[in-house]
Image (cartoon, helix red, strand yellow):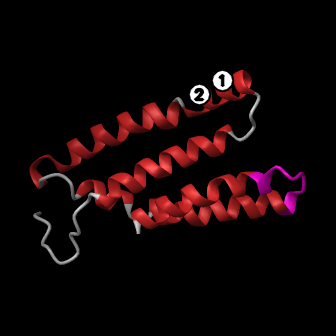
Amino acid sequence: MLFGSGVAMALLAYPAYLVMQQGTIVLAVLGIVVLAVLFAGHTGVIHTALMELFPASVRTTSYSIGYNIGLAIFGGAGPLIVTALIASTGDPGIPAYYVILAALATAGCAFFLSETRNSGVDA
């Protein structure tokens, strides 16, 4: 699911941003809905996948440190980076490129995750 949503987001982010920039509320909402549905595939499983990477004795601490550092770098600095890139390049598609880059990174990492469906997760 995580790999599939990453690939789908990478493929559809730019077209969704183009649709949102057409100047009508209907198309803007349509683009947002497409991105939200694709992102739901990510948010529905990412926290479980990240938690299962660590042994139970350090699971919460390890997960929270990694998650919050990543969020601070890519989420917190995202608007600043995107705004600066739009100002310097004049390309309004920069937010889509940022989403595509993050989606490809997610899909790439998810590809190498091992399946844990039938294995017990230590408590």
The kind of residue on which mark 2 rests is: Ile
Report x, y in % for residue 66: 30, 39
| Res. 91 image quadrant | top right
Q: Element at badge 1?
A: helix
Nearer-the-camera pick, 78 or 103: 103
Q: In this view, does 108 lie to the left or right of 88?
A: left
Out of 13 and 44, give the one closest to the viewer.
13
Going 43% across and 38% down the picture, which residue do you hit?
71
Specify the segment rendered in magenta: 18-26
Residue 99 appears at what percent x and percent y? 57, 46
Q: Which mark is residue 81?
A: 2
Q: What element carries label 2?
A: helix
Find residue 17 and report its horizontal and vertical position in percent.
72, 51
Name the side, left or right, on which 18 lies relative to 56: right
How many residues crowd mark 1 within 10 Å: few (<14), some (14–19), many (20+)? few
Q: Do the CB atoms of the residues marked 2 and 1 lie less than 8 Å apart?
A: yes
Residue 98 in percent (x, y) is at 57, 41
On whether residue 22 falls in the magenta region, the answer is: yes
Taking the spot 70% from the left edge, 21% from the top edge, the residue there is 88
Instruction: Identify which residue is drawn at 71% across, 57% down.
Output: 15
Residue pictured at 35% horizontal, 42% vertical:
67
- Decide if residue 53 is on the left or right side of residue 97: left
